Image (cartoon, grey):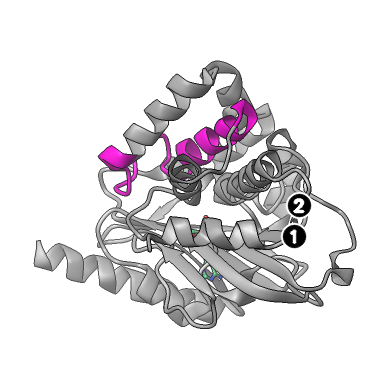
């Protein structure tokens, strides 16, 4: 049976469904989670459906997450979205579930899921949720469609990234046509930024160090974040803006996080494969969009060296 139909059957069977996603959520993670919760509630009003995980103030326009004490929940169906491994799921501790379904577009070696739908070629998890809703009896309304639209636009970086396919455009077109999406107001939610963030963007551009083989990096200290009044999630939102710089093949932001005492790393590429390198530094992700965590500056330097070598090898192979 088609995987989407199998997922629908499980959703239909359970009275309690918990929907989770990765820590440090981006618009695709939050939007897919809230859209799926709302679609299941629309279709099955008597089911208890909870979207769990830490709230993020800047994403509150997607809808609110459920604050209930879900540690009392028993025999639930757990659906994890946009996350390749369980150790990166936000709010798993103490949650009792009977079965677990994964829906994701990151590469992974799957183990321990009752059902797993992985589509590495999908632009986003929101694209997969839209497909799920369009191909089963799950209902959609304009709010669900808006969230799915925003998740796809954001994760495909406005259709710039290579995972954008004819299927992406077909789904976007269907969402717009059937649910009359008003993109202007939605884009304001997604892209409006305060002036201090624009100035911080200027700081990043100004301080990007470029190496011989096309690696660009910038190290961001807590003092700089304070000076520009931005939080340590802000660099993640800006990394994609540094695509298509002529001299740059791989670019990386290194942000020291005082709370975890780790260097949080965003890596992007327009050629060399980077996720296999990120995996050696407590990270992973997509072939051309990855993240990592380093404990020391020495480790950061080793990562930079590995990325520089990957750039050189890539250039030599061209
Ligand atoms: P980011 O740079 O945080 O936007 O992350 C880019 C991609 O890498 C996303 O698909 C993340 O899910 C993934 N990623 C980021 N950090 C990690 C990590 N520490 N471990 C595994 N995957 C990660």
Residue depicted at x 52% and y 17%:
180
Specify whether 71 is left or right of 39. right
Specify whether 129 is left or right of 63. left
State the image coordinates of residue 187 (x, y, percent, origin top left). Answer: 56, 25
Q: Is mark 2 on a helix, strand or loop?
A: loop
State which quadrant residue 88 falls in: bottom right
Please, is residue 130 above or below residue 182 in the view?
below
State the image coordinates of residue 47 (x, y, percent, origin top left). Answer: 76, 52
State which quadrant residue 212 falls in: bottom left
State the image coordinates of residue 204 (x, y, percent, origin top left). Answer: 52, 45
Q: How far apart are marks 1 and 2 (CA)?
A: 5 Å
Specify whether 222 is left or right of 31. right
Nearer to me, 93 or 249: 93
Residue depicted at x 73% and y 38%:
63
Residue position for label 2 = 47
Please, is residue 219 above or below residue 172 in the view?
below
Badge 1 vs badge 2, beta-carbon distance below 8 Å: yes
Please, is residue 93 above or below residue 166 in the view?
below
How crowded is the residue under tag 1: few (<14 C-alpha within 10 Å), some, or many (20+)? some
Residue 105 at least partly seen: no
* Mark earlier in primary sequence (1, 2): 1
Q: What element carries label 1?
A: loop
How crowded is the residue under tag 2: few (<14 C-alpha within 10 Å), some, or many (20+)? some
In which quadrant of the rendered image does the C terminus lie?
bottom left
In which quadrant of the rendered image does the N terminus lie?
bottom left
State the image coordinates of residue 208 (x, y, percent, origin top left). Answer: 45, 50
Nearer to me, 316 or 27: 27
Q: Which mark is residue 15?
A: 1
Please, is residue 109 above or below residue 192 in the view?
below
- Range of residues picked out in magenta: 141-167
- Mark 2 CB lies closer than 8 A to ligand 1: no
């Amino acid at each position: 049976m088609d995987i989407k139909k199998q997922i629908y059957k499980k959703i239909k069977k359970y009275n309690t469904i918990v929907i989770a996603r990765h820590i440090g959520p981006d618009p695709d993670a939050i939007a897919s989670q809230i859209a799926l919760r709302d679609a299941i509630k629309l279709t099955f009003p008597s089911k208890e459906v909870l979207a769990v995980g830490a709230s993020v103030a800047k994403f509150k326009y997607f809808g609110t997450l459920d604050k209930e004490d879900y540690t009392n929940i028993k025999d639930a169906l757990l659906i994890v979205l946009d996350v390749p491994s369980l150790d990166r799921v936000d709010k798993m501790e103490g949650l009792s579930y009977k079965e677990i379904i994964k829906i994701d577009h990151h590469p992974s070696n799957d183990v321990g899921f009752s059902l797993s739908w992985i589509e590495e070629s999908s632009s986003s998890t929101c694209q997969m949720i839209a497909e799920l809703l369009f191909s089963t009896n799950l209902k959609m309304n304009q709010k669900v469609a808006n969230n799915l639209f925003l998740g796809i636009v954001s994760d495909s970086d406005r259709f710039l990234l290579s995972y954008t396919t004819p299927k992406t455009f077909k789904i976007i077109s269907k969402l717009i046509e059937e649910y009359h999406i008003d993109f202007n107001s939605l884009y304001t939610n997604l892209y409006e930024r305060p002036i201090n963030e624009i100035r911080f963007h200027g700081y990043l551009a100004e301080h990007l160090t470029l190496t011989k083989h096309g690696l660009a990096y910038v190290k961001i200290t807590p003092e700089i974040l304070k000076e520009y009044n931005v939080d340590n999630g802000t660099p993640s939102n800006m990394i994609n803006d540094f695509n298509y710089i002529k001299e740059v093949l791989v670019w990386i932001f290194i942000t020291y996080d005082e709370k975890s005492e780790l260097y949080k790393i965003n890596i992007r590429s327009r050629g060399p494969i980077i996720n296999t390198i990120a995996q050696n530094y407590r990270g992973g992700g997509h072939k051309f969009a990855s993240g990592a965590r380093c404990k020391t500056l020495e480790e950061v330097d080793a990562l930079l060296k590995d990325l520089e070598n990957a750039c050189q090898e890539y250039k030599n192979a061209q």
